[in-house]
Amino acid sequence: MQEDKPDIKYLKIVYDDINQIIELVESYQDTVNSTRELYIANVSLQMNDDQDADALLCDTTATNIHFKRLRHEWARSQ
């Protein structure tokens, strides 16, 4: 097998380096996408927790109002 000329060797090295850079960028892209998906899932969970807490607060407030009204009506009937 004949030896490659220096220019050809250089181009092969550059080609390999460019392929490694492309693979690295694709890997970073996957990492960023996964991180973004985790962040979105976390925000969604927090929003659900906030909504659950708001619903619980509304239920508790409505129950308290109902019991206050019942106590007031009971006190008036006495």
Image (cartoon, rainbow, N blue to C red):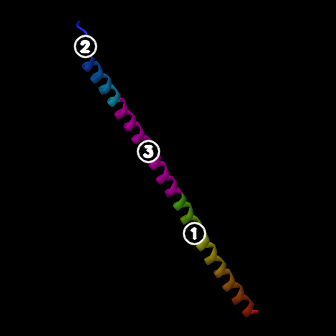
Residue drawn 56% across the image and 61% down it: 49
Residue drawn 34% across the image and 34% down it: 22
Query: Pointer 3: what residue?
Result: 32
Give the vertical position of 1 relative to 63 (above or below).
above
- In the picture, the disc for residue 4 is 2
Q: What residue type is labelled 1?
A: Asp
Queried whether the magenta region covers residue 35, the answer comes back as yes
In the rendered image, residue 75, in percent from the top left (x then y), is placed at 74, 90
Q: Main secondary structure of the magenta part?
A: helix
> Residue 51 falls in which quadrant of the image?
bottom right
Q: Are marks 2 and 3 in contact (CB under 8 Å)?
A: no
Queried whether the magenta region covers residue 3, the answer comes back as no
Is 21 on the left-hand or right-hand side of 7? right
Q: Which one is nearer the viewer's eye here, 40 or 19?
A: 19
Residue drawn 40% across the image and 36% down it: 27
- Tell me where the magenta segment starts and ends, as one range: 20-45
Residue drawn 25% across the image and 13% down it: 4
